Amino acid sequence: MSTHAPQAARAVTLPTTLDEAVAALAAVPAAVPVAGGTDLMAAVNSGQLRPAALVGLGRISEIRGWQYLDGHALLG
C-alpha cells in the first residue's frame, strides 16, 4: 500500500465556451476533459492516471443537456 498522495494535475482550466475548451485541450494534448469526474478521480486515486491538466466542462452552456432525435444523440 502506498502512503503517497496522488499527484494533482498541474493545471485546471474552466472554460465557459466550447471554443475555449477546444483551445485548452489543443494547448495541452495530455489534458483530460472533466464532466463529473467520478471515474477520473477513481483512476487518479488508484495511481492509474496522472493527468497533466484538467479541462472542466461544467460551465459550457453549449453542451448542457441532450436530446435523442432520429436515432442520434445531440448535445446542447
Image (tube, rainbow, N blue to C red):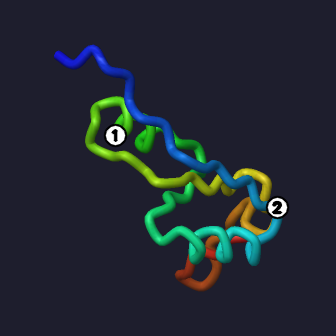
Residue 14: x percent and y percent? 74, 53
Q: Is residue 37 left or right of residue 43?
A: right
Residue 63: x percent and y percent? 73, 66
Residue type at tag 1: Ala
Q: Residues within 10 Å of mark 2 (few under 14, many from 20)?
A: some
Is residue 61 or residue 18 the one in the foreground?
18
Residue receiving disc 2: 16
Q: Residues within 10 Å of mark 1 (few under 14, many from 20)?
A: some
Lower position in the chain sequence, tag 1 or tag 2: 2
Q: Quadrant of residue 19?
A: bottom right
Identify which residue is drawn at 73% across, 60% down. 65
Residue receiving disc 1: 43
Q: Is residue 53 above or below residue 27?
A: above
Is residue 30 or residue 43 the one in the foreground?
30
Q: Is residue 62 left or right of residue 31?
A: right
Residue type at tag 2: Thr
Identify which residue is drawn at 41% across, 35% down. 7
Q: Quadrant of residue 1?
A: top left
* Quarter containing the C terminus: bottom right
Residue 13: x percent and y percent? 69, 54
